[in-house]
Amino acid sequence: MALFTLGLLLLGASNASAAVTGNKTNTVSPVAQNCGPESANIVCIQKYGSVLPPSFYRDADPTVGYSGTEVPDDPSWKLVSTADFVVFDQNRGLELLGKTPKIQHKYLEVLNVIHEAPIYVPSLNKLFVTQDGPPGNLTNLMIDLNTDPPTINTFVTNPPVYQPTGGILHNNTIYWAIQGNNVSLPGGVQQRPGVVRVNPSTLEAEWLVNNYYGFFYGGLNDLTVDRFGDVWFTDSDYALGLGVSNMSNQNQLATYRFTPSTGETVVVEDTLAHPNGITFSRDGKTLYITDSGLETVGPDASKGAGNFYDYPIRIYFTSTNKRNVYAFDVNRTPSNGVYLSNKRSIFQSLEGSPDGIKVAANGYIVIGAGLSNGADIVDENGSVLARIQTNHPVENICWTGPELKTLYLVGIGGITRVDWDLAGPDPNNYFVD
């Protein structure tokens, strides 16, 4: 009996040893390897990096990117930090990059402030980009793509509009989400946040809405337009945090739908911590909204994590807060009512917080990493296909060019250009049946 017990103990020890050894050999190695065409530095991650050597560590600071993960026991991981593109799904990821993908980091020189709302106007072959700062600034950027390299000019609309931060082209007209909230601007300009549409040829601006039954908005962050012409927009408190509003919020952070034909505004979603980017699927049946809840407005101004702003801000980061993309079903009633249902989280940011969000011609989704460098490409279910790695934070993206295969990524202190095979939708014919 004693010998039998000893045998069991030895067998158990042997199995335990095998289990430990198995754990080591079960690690996918190398985790990362170069792949794809040589026109860019592309790195493929094996099996989504699902099993790393146990010595790995990643700082919880949301400004630390995926490539900032420390994996000392796998030398291949060093490839990730210098990659232009990181591919997780090798079939679809390499396919969307195409045969000759190319990235031009900080392709255009800009101020070290937030750049947002990139809007391509095909009839002019120009890209309009907003400058969210410094406080008091009324100028934005018009990038002429008819020249090589493109030329940048600043412009002011008529009348001047203070601090647009999101937008879209609809029926060859620019629709802007305005966050600036100030009645003592240069030149006597007085403004509350709201929705403005701009003629891209004349730069004439027209206000569509600037209040909710007498309450002013905290600061619109982004918007989109549905196939019926209604404007859907997110309202946030970033304006206060960035110093472009001198008033505290009067309402909860929420998402609204505005009908230009009647002037009516209704709340369509009020559960997200910090609604941010917003867009529809190509068929208009799904609405995507990003939640950058890990960013909050604090009491004191500072330079911000990483000191990547040129002026003091009041934005704080908490890595355990929301940083998700949510999808909603869009339902229409027989009486022309609209409501959202079936809220579901489809993606949690690999780094930073989800900001601007756009849908490609084929339905894939591209998401700016916000306070972090780069953008993620996912399918309609949120499965990560690949990511673009930039050397500046990316707030939003926009396709340009005759085939809509040139992507501009705009953000804090930089504008990066990517040429690849993932085409964007025709901005004037966005919806498909």
Image: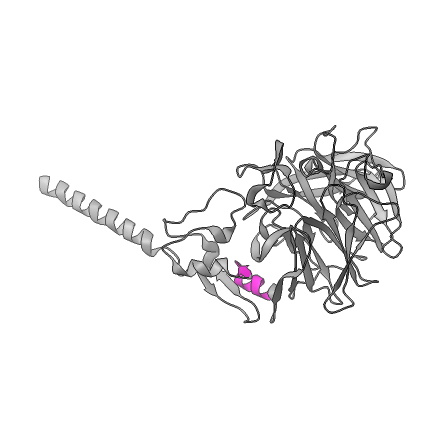
Q: Residue 382, how many percent across, how many down?
A: 59, 50
Q: Residue 196, how many percent across, how many down?
A: 83, 44
Examine the image and state in which quarter residue 343 appears: top right
Quadrant showing the N terminus: top left
Q: Is residue 284 left or right of residue 383?
A: right
Quadrant showing the C terminus: bottom right
Q: Is residue 306 left or right of residue 186?
A: left
Q: How is the image coloured?
A: one colour
Q: Is residue 91 magenta?
A: yes
Residue lying at 70% horizontally and 50% vertically, measured from the top left: 115
Give above or below for 384 relative to 190. Answer: below
Q: Is residue 17 left or right of residue 267?
A: left
Give above or below for 317 relative to 283. Answer: above
* Magenta-highlighted residues: 85-95
Q: Is residue 125 magenta?
A: no
Residue lying at 53% horizontally and 66% vertically, measured from the top left: 41
Let me know if residue 232 appears in the view: yes
Examine the image and state in which quarter residue 160 appears: top right
Residue lying at 61% horizontally and 54% vertically, measured from the top left: 379
Q: Residue 111, how many percent across, how many down?
A: 68, 52
Let me know if residue 31 appears in the view: no
Examine the image and state in which quarter residue 276 appears: top right
Looking at the image, the residue that sits furthest to the front is: 187
Q: Residue 316, how many percent across, how many down?
A: 59, 36
Looking at the picture, tell me which residue is in the foreground, 223 or 360.
Answer: 223
